[in-house]
């Protein structure tokens, strides 16, 4: 069985930086992970790329040869990847063992993980290949500076959660850049009534019913909470990694195998 993180989130949320820091952290631990670039528009990496969609198709080539713009071109590239899952992608997967750990660095185009089915079909293909997959949704912590932005981030995260149908972890990235962490911490696991009160104070009275529905939606889906990530702290990276490992049951099979081969003590 293989293991995989699908790293998603809006553009600029720190997905590639997260992948780079995660790789360095695992190197320090003596643990092997493989980073996969799924962004056909990517140019520079701070980590070694073990699999790269640009070997199949790149955004620059699509824009030049077909005449599409950046957004349409990226969708075209991802749909081409979807069409190539049974040949190019499967050929790439043959280079990895059953218990390898892959981290997929995805593009930041939000429709790819909210309503376009490309990533969902990609995930289903990984599952058929016997991978345990977890969606890791990153949101810039500076974006969550007030309740309206927080609700917006929750709705995008919830859309991805419903679309992908995966174990799902929300991470507030760039916590090292937040000057007043108390303003952010109150949104890590907020109370619905507090959210509603804050929304009503900031928005016109005619939005009262909408605010109530949004606050209840966040409360009903209590899974929409966030883990803060400060990349300056190894303990913060390890906490997030351990949380994800638990979601995809990484290491549990290995423990069983060790116990299976432990020598049996002779009875007196």
Image (spheres, rainbow, N blue to C red):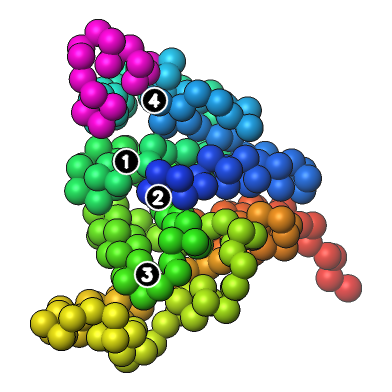
SS type, badge 3: helix
SS type, badge 1: loop
From mark 1 to mark 2, how far is it between C-alphas?
Answer: 8 Å
Whole-percent x, y for residue 202 in the image: 29, 80
From mark 2 to mark 3, how far is it between C-alphas?
Answer: 14 Å
Mark 1: few/some/many CA within 10 Å (<14, 14-19, 20+): some
Q: Is residue 172 magenta?
A: no
Which of disc 4 and disc 3 is earlier in sequence?
Answer: 4
Q: What stretch of residues is rendered in magenta?
A: 56-72
Circle 4 sits on which residue? 40
Mark 4: few/some/many CA within 10 Å (<14, 14-19, 20+): many
Dominant SS of magenta comes to helix
Mark 3: few/some/many CA within 10 Å (<14, 14-19, 20+): some
Circle 3 sits on which residue? 150
SS type, badge 2: loop
Q: Is residue 170 left or right of residue 241?
A: left
Whole-percent x, y for residue 113 in the image: 29, 47
Nearer-the-camera pick, 134 or 2: 134
Which of disc 2 and disc 1 is earlier in sequence?
Answer: 2
- The answer to the question of whether label 1 and label 4 lie on touching residues, with beta carbons closer than 8 A, is no
Residue at 29% over, 59% down:
156
């Amino acid at each position: 069985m293989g293991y995989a993180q699908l790293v998603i989130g809006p553009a600029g949320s720190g997905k590639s930086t997260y992948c780079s820091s995660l790789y360095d952290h695992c190197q320090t631990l003596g643990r092997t992970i493989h980073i996969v670039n799924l962004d056909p528009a990517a140019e520079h990496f701070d980590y070694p790329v073990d699999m790269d969609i640009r070997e199949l198709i790149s955004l620059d080539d699509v824009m030049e040869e077909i005449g599409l713009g950046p957004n349409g071109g990226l969708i075209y590239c991802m749909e081409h990847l979807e069409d190539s899952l049974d040949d190019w992608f499967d050929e790439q997967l043959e280079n990895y063992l059953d218990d390898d750990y892959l981290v997929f660095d995805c593009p930041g185009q939000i429709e790819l993980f909210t309503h376009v089915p490309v990533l969902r079909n990609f995930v289903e293909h990984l599952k058929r290949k016997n991978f345990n997959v977890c969606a890791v949704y990153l949101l810039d912590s500076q974006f969550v500076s007030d309740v309206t932005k927080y609700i917006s981030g929750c709705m995008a995260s919830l859309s991805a959660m419903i679309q992908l149908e995966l174990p799902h972890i929300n991470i507030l990235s760039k916590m090292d850049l937040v000057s007043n962490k108390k303003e952010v911490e109150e949104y890590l696991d907020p109370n619905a009534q507090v959210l509603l009160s804050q929304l009503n104070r900031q928005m016109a009275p005619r939005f009262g019913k909408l605010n109530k529905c949004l606050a209840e939606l966040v409360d009903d889906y209590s899974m929409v909470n966030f883990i803060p990530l400060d990349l300056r702290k190894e303990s913060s990276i390890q906490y997030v990694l351990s949380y994800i490992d638990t979601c995809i049951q990484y290491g549990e099979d290995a423990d069983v195998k060790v116990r299976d081969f432990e020598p049996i003590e002779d009875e007196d």
